[in-house]
């Protein structure tokens, strides 16, 4: 039939009149320029854009700082391993030196014990052989002079030598014999020389070193120092509350920016980071150095005494918090001890000993 349409053909659309198409075109038209300008003038959009920019910048800076921190931590760990090896070597060397010093101290103690035994033997011998008053007085004076010479040679004990010579002089004064006048004059001359000699307070210095060794466990380390806390921000006053929105927003943003950066001044290189085991070995090695200095003091080894104290001072200034008063006191005490001369040239008692021998020979010839 001719009235049906083909399957792929659609019926013709009727033409749209121009008057009906005008409202549709007006509805699809973009908004006017005034509406767009009002949308961009909204302050919250600017704040959001600034906040997003700051957040992105902070994220990038944080990633960069994290990478730098990881590299620095790896470097510090490598340095700490090398320092640990060096510390073990120093500890081993210190133990060997302590063994040598202990051997020397044992030899000195053996000599002192031998001198004491000889002194006891001399006392018994003089008591058996001295028969009259003059011989007994000479024996007692010789014993005191010999004891003073031993105190000077073996222990460097000036005060002990002075006391021994004073006892000999008082014994001569009680005898009041003319033939003892020359001997007493010589004893007084040696006594004045000993009194004018410089005095080394060995016991006091040893006690100070012992106190430093005891304080080594409590001295604060340099890397434990914390930055000083910032001052508390006072509460908002009326002037802040009366500020405008943009002014308060600017103050808040400035406060956030200032909190991102911290500036701290160091007057010396950054302290080394030490693990708890390394801190323990550091304190133990410091105590070993002070112990070596104490042993060198007792053995009158000036070079070892001064070198050990200087090394201890260098360790304290490098690894300990020098801003702490206890560390400052310890460093000052070490400096004072290192500047003390423990080896002094003591006068000999050869004149008194020779005068005693001459007097005894004269009495034997008679």
Image (cartoon, rainbow, N blue to C red):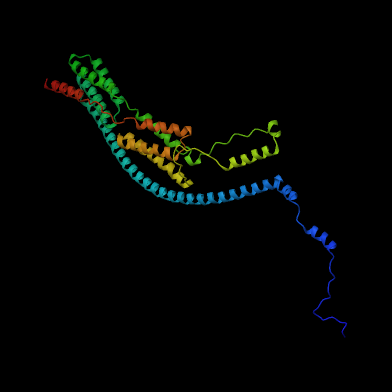
Residue 84 drawn above or below residue 145: below
Q: Would residue 26 be seen by someone viewing this image from the given angle?
A: yes
Residue found 18% across the figure and 17% down from its top: 182
Drawn side of residue 32 relative to residue 48, left or right: right
Please give left or right for residue 179 compared with residue 22 in the image: left
140 vs 183, nearest the viewer: 183
Q: Residue at x 33, y 27 (%)?
A: 200
User: In the drawing, does residue 256 fall left or right of residue 121?
Assistant: right
Rendered-image quadrant of the C terminus? top left
Q: Residue furthest bottom?
A: 1
Identify which residue, 145 or 263, lies in the foreground: 263
Q: Nearer the viewer, residue 311 or 265?
A: 265
- Res. 242 image quadrant: top right
Q: Locate the N terminus and report the quarter of the image it occupies.
A: bottom right
Rendered residue at 43%/43% (across/down)? 282
Q: Position of residue 100 (x, y in %)?
A: 31, 42
Left/right of residue 45 with respect to residue 281 in the rendered view: right
Most extreme residue toward the left is 365
Label total for image = 0
The image position of residue 25, as x and y in percent, is 79, 60
Q: Residue 149: percent from the left, percent from the top?
A: 24, 27
Evaluate whether residue 237 shows in this view: no
């Amino acid at each position: 039939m001719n009235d049906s349409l083909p399957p792929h053909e659609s019926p013709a659309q009727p033409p749209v009149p121009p008057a009906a198409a005008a409202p549709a075109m007006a509805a699809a038209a973009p908004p006017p320029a005034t509406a767009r300008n009002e949308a961009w003038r909204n302050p919250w959009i600017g704040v959001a854009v600034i906040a997003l920019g700051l957040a992105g910048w902070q994220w990038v800076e944080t990633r960069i700082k994290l990478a730098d921190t990881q590299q620095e931590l790896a470097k510090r760990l490598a340095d700490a391993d090398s320092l640990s090896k060096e510390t073990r070597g120093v500890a081993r060397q210190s133990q060997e030196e302590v063994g040598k010093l202990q051997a020397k101290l044992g030899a000195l103690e053996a000599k002192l014990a031998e001198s004491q035994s000889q002194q006891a033997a001399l006392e018994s011998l003089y008591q058996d052989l001295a028969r009259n008053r003059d011989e007994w007085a000479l024996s007692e004076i010789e014993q005191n002079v010999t004891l003073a010479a031993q105190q000077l040679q073996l222990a460097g004990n000036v005060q002990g030598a002075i006391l021994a010579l004073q006892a000999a002089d008082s014994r001569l004064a009680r005898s009041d014999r003319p033939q003892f006048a020359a001997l007493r004059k010589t004893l007084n001359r040696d006594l004045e020389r000993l009194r004018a000699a410089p005095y080394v307070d060995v016991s006091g210095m040893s006690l100070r070193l012992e106190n430093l060794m005891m304080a080594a466990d409590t001295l604060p380390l340099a890397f434990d120092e914390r930055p000083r806390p910032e001052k508390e921000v006072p509460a908002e006053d009326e002037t802040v509350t009366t500020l405008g929105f943009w002014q308060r927003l600017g103050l808040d943003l400035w406060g956030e920016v200032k909190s991102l950066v911290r500036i701290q001044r160091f007057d010396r290189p950054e302290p080394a980071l030490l693990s708890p085991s390394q801190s323990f070995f550091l304190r133990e090695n410091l105590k070993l150095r002070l112990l070596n200095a104490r042993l060198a003091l007792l053995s009158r080894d000036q070079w070892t005494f001064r070198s050990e104290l200087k090394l201890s001072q260098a360790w304290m200034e490098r690894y300990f918090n020098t801003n702490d008063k206890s560390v400052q006191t310890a460093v000052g005490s070490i400096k004072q001890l290192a500047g003390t001369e423990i080896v002094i040239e003591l006068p000999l008692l050869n004149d008194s000993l020779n005068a005693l021998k001459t007097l005894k020979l004269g009495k034997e010839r008679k």
